Amino acid sequence: MQKTLLIIVLAALCLNFKAKSQTSDKPITSLAIGDTIPEAVWHISLQNIYQTGNKKTITLNDYRGKVIILDFWATWCGTCIARFPHVDSLNKVYQDQVQFILVNTSSRDSNEQKVRAFTIRWIASHQEISVPIIFQKKVFNSYFPCHVLPHYVWIGADGRIKAITEWTLLNKQNIESLIAGLPLNLPVKVW
């Protein structure tokens, strides 16, 4: 009888501990236009698979105070890959005020070594680029969800999300408006 009672008490305690640990995890809320980037997101360590400046990891905080444009891509997205040279040229033109970051986001690209090999092959057959290329990080990608690629998240120098767009809106006029602190009245990418 005492053994049975002890087992029941221990089982109840185990269930209680599990329930408490599940409720202590805060759910990640995706960010939207107008939201300020949370401090924790600024410091998420991101694996840089194409080491510009020999930095193996970067954070958004490395570029705080600049405009940041996150370019979400995948190895299987032809339009994403075709946009690399355009993104790189814009990064070079606006390097003092803007930082582009290529963020691999696809769950189909789950093997970091394959994504790194793809990136190195592409660069070897096309051109060197000045933009960091980040391997997917689920917690980071959860803050910036996307369903259709390419996908761009525009972050102002003030740390607020200014736009979420498709690739056709990534041009000098819109970038210069963002740098100048003008409102971006761009259509929101909803898909």
Image (cartoon, rainbow, N blue to C red):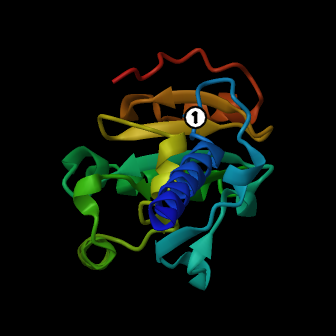
Side of 66 relative to 83 (left or right): right
Residue 88 visible in the shown view: no
Residue 99 occupies which quadrant of the picture?
A: bottom right
Instruction: Please identify the residue farthest to the bottom as the structure is shown.
Output: 54
Side of 191 relative to 29 (left or right): left
Q: Is residue 103 above or below residue 129?
A: above
Residue 111 visible in the shown view: yes
- At which x and y percent is residue 29? 58, 34
Side of 169 relative to 57 (left or right): left
- At which x and y percent is residue 14? 53, 58
Give 135 or 12, whichever is nearer the viewer: 12
The residue that mark 1 highlights is 29
Give 36 or 172, whichever is nearer the viewer: 36
- At which x and y percent is residue 179? 72, 36
Which residue is at 19% across, 54% downward?
76
Side of 61 relative to 78 (left or right): right
Residue 181 occupies which quadrant of the picture?
A: top right
Give 161 or 2, whichever is nearer the viewer: 2
Which residue is at 28% across, 64% downward?
110
Q: How dense is the environment of label 1, judged by Cα within 10 Å: few (below 14), some, or many (20 and up)? A: few
Please tell me whether mark 1 sits on a helix, a strand or a loop: loop
Which residue is at 37% across, 56% downward?
84
For the C terminus, give its image quadrant. top left
